[in-house]
Image: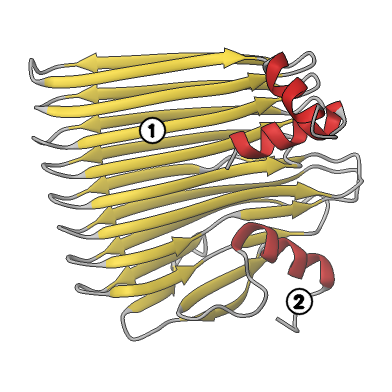
Amino acid sequence: MLKFDEIQKRLFEEVADLHELPEGAYNLRTNGKAADRKSTENIEIISKEDGTGIDIRIKDHTVKQSVHIPVVISESGLTETVYNDFYVGEDCDVLIVAGCGIDNCGTQDSEHDGIHRFWVGKNSKVRYVEKHYGSGDGTGQRILNPQTEVYMAEGSSMEMEMVQIKGVDSTERTTLAELEANAHLVVRERLMTHGTQQAISNYHVKLNGEDSSADIVSRGVARDRSYQKLDLKITGNAACSGHTECDSIIMDEGKILAVPSLEANSVDAQLIHEAAIGKIAGDQLIKLMTLGLTEQEAEEQIINGFLK
């Protein structure tokens, strides 16, 4: 990745674990422009005609292949909205890595709003990883507002890993999904806020087909005077199963609001929600401190384990 400066290289490493150009298909975006791109025989990346984003087309029967589409911003004052559409064929098994990193050392806000839409074909399996990261010592904010839409055909499955651990001042994540018969969705969200940061996560999953299922688990840590809101909704429109879980640690003067919502429109819909918000248990701190850790070190150990 010699064409990128050191800040951009670090951001790519943070959000996509890229230390060099990835194998497989990729589209790397820096400061509002496409920086590098590669399609493969089975995965084609095409710019939209209106210039607002890209289409990613994955052929039927594509297995054990990946596509990376991370975005990094190192300019203060840059604001962009990008639309990326994924068309996953039938009987596929693929990894999709997205994410955005912003380094803002200036006085103006920098913002990236990524709208990702997925059409997952019959019997296909997708693993999707989206990481957000912020850095920089400027007074301008680092803002990320991702929106994800997922439409899952019969027999398909999707596993989503959504991570935001450091440096993002404001984010509102909206995830919408519709599942047909025997489709399965798993979401694992990990989130930490500090300072005066604000993070809002909205999920609405519609289980439309028989034997469809969704399992959504969000783990969050709110430190200092930060604020988190978790709004998780599952609608069961058929014989289906759905589970949501909010598990949060609150510290200092942080605030957390959990808003669970379940809607059953079928007598055979089985929907469950669990929620827990609390501080770090004193006995956990004492146990680690007896092993030689300071109180701060013990807190960090507990938080790191909680957000794994």
140 is higher (above) or lower (below) than 224? below
Depth check, front residue: 246 or 132: 246
Q: CA distance from mark 1 to mark 2?
A: 36 Å
Q: Is residue 126 visible?
A: yes
Q: Position of residue 129 (x, y in %)?
A: 49, 54
Mark nearer the N terminus (1 vs 2):
2
Left or right placement of residue 165 versus residue 48 in this view: right
Q: Tell me the mark number nearer the camera, choosing from 1 and 2.
A: 1
For the point 59% across and 51% down, the residue is 131
For the point 32% across and 70% down, the residue is 57
The quarter of the picture where the N terminus appears is: bottom right
10 Å neighbourhood of mark 1: few (<14), some, or many (≥20)? many
The quarter of the picture where the C terminus appears is: top right
85 is higher (above) or lower (below) than 67? above
**Label 2: which secondary element:** loop
Amino acid type at image mark 2 = Phe
User: Where does label 2 land, which residue?
Assistant: 4
Q: Is residue 170 visible?
A: no
Left or right placement of residue 65 versus residue 5 in this view: left
Q: Position of residue 125 (x, y in %)?
A: 27, 59
**Label 1: which secondary element:** strand
Depth check, front residue: 21 or 138: 21
When asked about the image quadrant of residue 171, the answer is top right
Mark seen at residue 216: 1
Q: Position of residue 18 (x, y in %)?
A: 63, 70
Depth check, front residue: 18 or 199: 18
Amino acid type at image mark 1 = Ile
